[in-house]
Each structure stands twice: as structure tokens, then as C-alpha cells.
């Protein structure tokens, strides 16, 4: 087979028509999970704790211009997210609902990077993809009321891009585990499992070092290989059982929120169309006939609908024009970004976990236990008199914990202190000092993955004059193994 013929085969398989059942199923499951997650944020009071209570917010680089809403607007945003989730589930004004959810969810996540989690980033990516996927052409109120034509098949790329995104999460999480701390020292799993000894029956077992090594190596192999087993029809069902067991175990042992549920839900895109069809038939509301629901009778598909093949000739006729070219370009750009971004850490020297340059958005899941102790000082540049800052007066406990180990947040906080104490008068004993362009110094110690605490930021740096950008963080102390 020549290179050209291989390309043609891939191209036509990319646009091969497949049943729309899987896309409709995924739409409902994604919307339901987001409805649960958003409701959980509201019911647990996290909207107030994470976004209203803090006096200062750590913005992402390049997004400091985003306006910060007041409490009323924030609760309205979360309410609109709930409405959007319902719209996604029902496929009712779907495009508007999907776009609304993506914009609002991503906006909230950009408000403060203290709350950054890998699965929040994953949700934003899936929400973005859902805006462009025809997930409302089947088993939706949009199709039922004729807002969009019923479409019993969709191009294969609409399913494949979701599989690709799941594959990126797993494979890059596996690649990230190919490092000494995880494989040779079983860290940070050893530390976390030792703190889980309260579990009845299994508590003593979790304190055994060999258990931590088993979990580390199994987790690495699982992340690297599970997607390939899910793609294989013969191993798919068994692989999904492992998905459930693996993520339920992590959910029970570690406080990582809804991440395991996000992964279990996301990997259902690999399951057979027959399974998706059975679920949709079960969900069918009595008396509501959604056009095209019964795939086997309504569309003439064979029992194993996954083996449907549409001739390459028809695909060439339908997809060889401008629209397919635009789709190809957009998908190529999206795929390239998803592959390249996790490797950007290679542009920087030093230990990635120490400098954290290239750490976010790279699917490094549960790879680091990092704690810090930070003292900040405001220094008068003329007299060198210094004022010890009480950080609890400026940051919440969660913000202080995250800031003390993340260099970009340390700089942001230092700049914030400079702005606060500019032209501020401080009384030290019987003397008073009015700070004009005050210096901000910090002495920070950090422990990484069970190592002894070591100096992270020395007190000799004036952090207020350092720029928070993508350049190498020379002001961090060297990491000592």
C-alpha cells in the first residue's frame, strides 16, 4: 500500500458515516455530569469559598484583563451553567447551550488559577468540541421539534476527536509517570497511601511499601495502554471494567473530587454503538417518539451497526469540497496543540516539579506532593527597615497553600503586596515609615515528594521588580535531589 493510498484510506475513514447514537449518548452523559458538578459547587458553598471570599485572585498569564464579577453575577453565572447543562442533556437549543456552558465554565476557571485541576481543563476542551459537534441531530428536542434535521449518521471524525482527546489525557498521563520519583521511589503514592491507614481491613496493607510500588507501576502501564485496549473490539469490554475498577479505587483512596467520574464517563465513547443504543432506548420518555431512535428498524443497519461501511466514492462526493478542507485544517491545528503543549516543559532547564514551568495543561495527574512555608517581607529601599507580612490577612488558606509552592503565584502575590503597601505608613516602635516603591522579599522552603525541606526562594531577591512571564525562573534556588 503506497503512502497516498494509506492517506486516502485514513481520510475516507475519517469521513465515513457512522451511527449518531454514540454522539447523542455522549451529549447526554456529559451534560448530566456537568449538571451534577455545577450543582455540587453551589450546594457545597464553593462558589463563595473559592471566588467570593478571597480578597485577591491569581490570574493566568495573559488573562489578567478579565473582569472579576461580584457575588450576584457569580451566582447568576452558575445558575446559567445549570440551565445550559439541561439544554445539553435534552438537546434543546443545543448549540446555544453548549456555547454558553463552554464560555461560562472557562470564564470561571480563568478567574483564579488557585482552583486549577486537570479535569477542569479537560471539561473546557470537551465543552469546546461539543459546540462544533452535531450532537443534537439525533435523540434531541431540537430534532423532535424540527429545529434541526434528524441525522441518523454523523461523520466518523465527530466520534474520533472525542476518542483522541481521551487518548491524550491517558497517554500523556502515562508518559509523565516515566520518571524516577514515580517508578523508582513510588512517590508521592507511598506518602498518600501511608496516610490512608484508617481504612478498615486494608489500612495496614496500604502502609506496605510494595503496595505503593505496585500502584505506581500499574498506574503507569494502565495510562499508557488502556486506550489501545479500549480501541480494540476484542478487549474493549474487559478494558472498561478495568477503567471502572481503577478510577473507583482512586476515588475511594484519594480526595480528587469528580475526576474519576469524569474519566469513567469520558471513556464510554469507546464502547459499542449497541451499548449506546440500549441506553438511549432505556431513557426514551413514554409517549415521546424521537425520530430515528430505533436504529435497526428505522435505518436498516445490520445488527452489528459498528460494521456499517459507506463507500469511499460517496464520501469523496460529499466531503471533498471547502467544508471538509476547513474541518481538516481546524482538526489538524487542534490535534497539534494538544500534542505539543504537554511537551513545552522541554524548553526550560531544571526539575519540572521544582520550577513548574510547563506543568499545567500537561496531564500530570497525581505526580507531586509539594508543600511550602513562606514568609514575605516589605522592605523600605532607603532605610532597609522591613515589615513581616501576615499572609492570612491577604489570602485564604487554600490560596496560601497553593501560592507557597508555585513560582508564578509567588511573583503575583509579591506584586500584589507591592501595590498594597505603596505609599502606606507603617509604625515600627517609635518610628514610622512610608513606603515608596517598597521592595518585596520572601524566604520560602519547600519539600517535594517526601524529601527534606529545602530553600526555594532566598530572601535576597526583590520580587517586586521581577516580571511574571515565560522566561526561565533564575530566582529559584537549585533543586537538590
Image: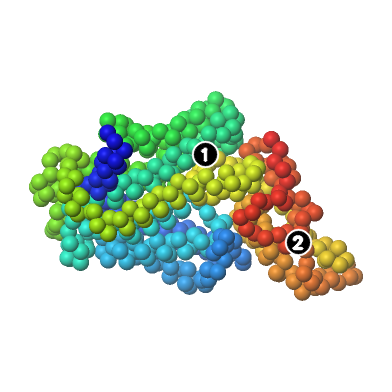
Task: Write down the residue under mark 1.
Answer: 176
Residue 467 versus residue 375: which sits nearer the camera? Answer: 467
Position in image of residue 476 (x %, y %):
71, 49
Q: Mark 1 falls on what kind of element?
A: helix
Is residue 134 something that shows in the picture? no
Report crowding for label 2: few under 14, some 14 to 19, many 20 or more residues within 10 A (C-alpha). Answer: many
Residue appearing at x 24%, y 45% in the figure: 12
Position in image of residue 357 (x %, y %):
60, 49
Residue 193 versus residue 96: which sits nearer the camera? Answer: 96
Residue appearing at x 67%, y 56% in the figure: 410
Q: CA distance from mark 2 to mark 1?
A: 35 Å
Horizontal side of 402 relative to 33 (left or right) equals: right
The relative height of residue 426 versus residue 363 in the rendered view (above or below) is below
Is residue 162 something that shows in the picture? yes
Q: How many marks?
A: 2
- Considering the image in quadrants, where does the N terminus appear? top left
Residue appearing at x 54%, y 28% in the figure: 213
Position in image of residue 15 (x %, y %):
25, 49
Task: Write down the residue under mark 2.
Answer: 440
Q: Are marks 2 and 1 in contact (CB under 8 Å)?
A: no
Q: Residue 37 occupies which quadrant of the picture?
A: bottom left
Amino acid at each position: 500500500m503506497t503512502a497516498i493510498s494509506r492517506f486516502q484510506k485514513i481520510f475516507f475513514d475519517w469521513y465515513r458515516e457512522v451511527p449518531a447514537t454514540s454522539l447523542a449518548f455522549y451529549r447526554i452523559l456529559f451534560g448530566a455530569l456537568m449538571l451534577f458538578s455545577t450543582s455540587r459547587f453551589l450546594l457545597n458553598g464553593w462558589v463563595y469559598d473559592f471566588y467570593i471570599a478571597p480578597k485577591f485572585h491569581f490570574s493566568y498569564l495573559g488573562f489578567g484583563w478579565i473582569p472579576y464579577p461580584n457575588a450576584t453575577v457569580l451566582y447568576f453565572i452558575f445558575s446559567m451553567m445549570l440551565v445550559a447543562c439541561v439544554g445539553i442533556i435534552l438537546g434543546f437549543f443545543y448549540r446555544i447551550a453548549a456555547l454558553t456552558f463552554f464560555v461560562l465554565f472557562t470564564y470561571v476557571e480563568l478567574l483564579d488559577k488557585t482552583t486549577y485541576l486537570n479535569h477542569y481543563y479537560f471539561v473546557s476542551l470537551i465543552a469546546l468540541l461539543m459546540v462544533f459537534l452535531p450532537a443534537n441531530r439525533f435523540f434531541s428536542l431540537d430534532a423532535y421539534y424540527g429545529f434541526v434535521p434528524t441525522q441518523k449518521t454523523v461523520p466518523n471524525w465527530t466520534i474520533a476527536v472525542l476518542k483522541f482527546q481521551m487518548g491524550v489525557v491517558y497517554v500523556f498521563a502515562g508518559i509523565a509517570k516515566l520518571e524516577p520519583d514515580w517508578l523508582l521511589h513510588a512517590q508521592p503514592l507511598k506518602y498518600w497511601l501511608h496516610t490512608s491507614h484508617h481504612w478498615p481491613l486494608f489500612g495496614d496493607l496500604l502502609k506496605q511499601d510494595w503496595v505503593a510500588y505496585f500502584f505506581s507501576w500499574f498506574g503507569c502501564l494502565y495510562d499508557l495502554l488502556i486506550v489501545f485496549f479500549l480501541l480494540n473490539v476484542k478487549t474493549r469490554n474487559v478494558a472498561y471494567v478495568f477503567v471502572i475498577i481503577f478510577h473507583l479505587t482512586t476515588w475511594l483512596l484519594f480526595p480528587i473530587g469528580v475526576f474519576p467520574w469524569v474519566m469513567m464517563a469520558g471513556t464510554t465513547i469507546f464502547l459499542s454503538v449497541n451499548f449506546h443504543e440500549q441506553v438511549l432506548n432505556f431513557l426514551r420518555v413514554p409517549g415521546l417518539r424521537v425520530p430515528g431512535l430505533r436504529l435497526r428498524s428505522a435505518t436498516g443497519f445490520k445488527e452489528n451497526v459498528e460494521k456499517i461501511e459507506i463507500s469511499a466514492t460517496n464520501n469523496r462526493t460529499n466531503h471533498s469540497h471547502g467544508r471538509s478542507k476547513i474541518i481538516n485544517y481546524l482538526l489538524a491545528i487542534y490535534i497539534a496543540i494538544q500534542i505539543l503543549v504537554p511537551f513545552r516543559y522541554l524548553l526550560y532547564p531544571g526539575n519540572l516539579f521544582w520550577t513548574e514551568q510547563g506543568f499545567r495543561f500537561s496531564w500530570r495527574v497525581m505526580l507531586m506532593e509539594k508543600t511550602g512555608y513562606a514568609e514575605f517581607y516589605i522592605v523600605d529601599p532607603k532605610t532597609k527597615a522591613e515589615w513581616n507580612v501576615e499572609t492570612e490577612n491577604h489570602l485564604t488558606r487554600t490560596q496560601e497553600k497553593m501560592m507557597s509552592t508555585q513560582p508564578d503565584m509567588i511573583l503575583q502575590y509579591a506584586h500584589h503586596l507591592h501595590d498594597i503597601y505603596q505609599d502606606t505608613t507603617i509604625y515600627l516602635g517609635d518610628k514610622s515609615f512610608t513606603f515608596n516603591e517598597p521592595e518585596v522579599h520572601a524566604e520560602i522552603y519547600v519539600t517535594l515528594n517526601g524529601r527534606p525541606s529545602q530553600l526555594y526562594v532566598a530572601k535576597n531577591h526583590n520580587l517586586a521588580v521581577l516580571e511574571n512571564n515565560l522566561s526561565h525562573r533564575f530566582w529559584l534556588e537549585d533543586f537538590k535531589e
